Amino acid sequence: MNSYNVIIIGAGAAGLMCAIEAGKRGRSVLLIEHAEKIGKKILISGGGRCNFTNLNLSAENFISNNPHFCKSALARYTPNDFIKLVEKYGINYHEKKFGQLFCDGSAKQIVELLQSESDAAGVEILVNCNVESVTTSDSAFSVNTNIGEFESESLVIASGGISIPQMGATDFGYKVAKQFGIKLTKTVPGLVPFTLKEKSLSELSGVSIDAVVSCGRFSFKEAVLFTHKGLSGPAILQISNYHNDGDEISINLLPEKRIEEIISENKGSKMELATFLSQLFPKRFAEKWCSMYFPTRQLKQLKDKDITEIAEKIHKWKITPNGTEGFGKAEVTKGGVDTDELSGKTMESKKVKGLYFIGEVVDVTGWLGGYNFQWAWASGFAAGQYV
């Protein structure tokens, strides 16, 4: 049997960072990946340019049953720490908006950076390696795979969540947690498009509008995209993290202006409402929206109560999603290994000595915009100091 100080299962962002840090400490590290190459999710992120962190990061950008859990790791490995690594490799990057940092070139540069750091730290990486079982005895872990059996003092689960199963995501990490009696919180799709009962809105597929989307006390101002199945776009993905089944969302379609004032200034016009609104919104949207709520009305025909009603619909358009597009379209998995089961300092299980959980498999979910990568880097770094 091949023995190592540390075995890490999952060569994504968190697993790679943990392997690098453990290797730097002189630990012998084996990194196991069931896919044919490392960092597959990194490669598709940010439209292929990898939104690798966010300058505006704080604990408020994360969701967990214990909102304080992420603070320690995030404080010890900051966005600036990862930026220094990016700059060390001469990778050019830019801020797109809201503190989101992207590679100027390709996400492949981030994977190559992590590969180089892993090589320098002496990390051994096995791809196309499927774990068949994990057992423990005499303070050691045995990992049985299709390639052979391996043993280690420390075992790190960095296998991710179950979002985007077409990329090879599995529930492996949750199964290991259950095997060792470690509690899980409910897992649901996060950063995910909504589906709608109102099928006629599918006619607007491809139309995008900058809006403010709210649910409860949370609001996000970004693009809303109409799809064949419902609603997507950054604002919708963001609010989906705070939405529960049956909740209503409110959309302010014109957050920068007051529609009452604009209509009142043109009250004498013979212009159709749909034509008028086409000056403020995409034509397809204006026509469809008017056909649903205010068909064939000229501005001069509108009474004060009509204008009030139009304003209510434009600034507080109420929609109750039918559901979501599920894990297949979710960017992340909300929920996972209960943070009460882990040390916030080391990511080690409180019940099983030497067993660690990092990254998306843990019940810590970030906003859209580089936050989930920063959690991966930070949680991987934290565990890497102790495994």
Image (cartoon, helix red, strand yellow):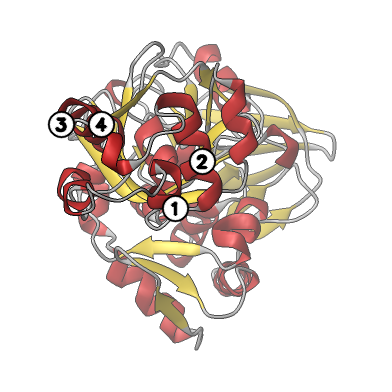
Q: Nearer the viewer, mark 4 or mark 3?
A: 3
Q: Are marks 2 and 1 in contact (CB under 8 Å)?
A: yes
Amino acid residing under circle 4:
Lys
Residue with the mark numbered 2? 287
Gap between marks 3 and 2 measured at Cα = 22 Å
Q: Earlier in the sequence, mark 2 or mark 1?
A: 1
Residue with the mark numbered 1? 278
Q: Earlier in the sequence, mark 2 or mark 4?
A: 2
Q: Earlier in the sequence, mark 1 or mark 4?
A: 1
For label 3, the SS is helix
Residue with the mark numbered 3? 304
Q: Are marks 3 and 2 in contact (CB under 8 Å)?
A: no
Residue found at x 28% / y 48%: 254
Report if residue 384 is visible in the image.
Answer: no
**105 on left or right of 26:** right
Q: Earlier in the sequence, mark 4 or mark 3?
A: 3
Gap between marks 2 and 1 measured at Cα = 8 Å
Q: Is residue 190 above or below residue 78?
A: above
Residue 136: image quadrant is top right
Q: Earlier in the sequence, mark 3 or mark 2?
A: 2
Q: Are marks 4 and 3 in contact (CB under 8 Å)?
A: no
Q: Which mark is residue 344?
A: none
For label 2, the SS is helix
Residue 43: image quadrant is bottom right
Residue with the mark numbered 4? 316
For label 1, the SS is loop
The crowding category of the residue bearing disc 3, from other C-alpha atoms within 10 Å (few below 14, some 14 to 19, many at least 20), is few
Q: Nearer the viewer, mark 1 or mark 4?
A: 1
The crowding category of the residue bearing disc 4, from other C-alpha atoms within 10 Å (few below 14, some 14 to 19, many at least 20), is some
The crowding category of the residue bearing disc 2, from other C-alpha atoms within 10 Å (few below 14, some 14 to 19, many at least 20), is many
Report if residue 328 is visible in the image.
Answer: yes
In the image, 162 versus 266, the foreground residue is 266
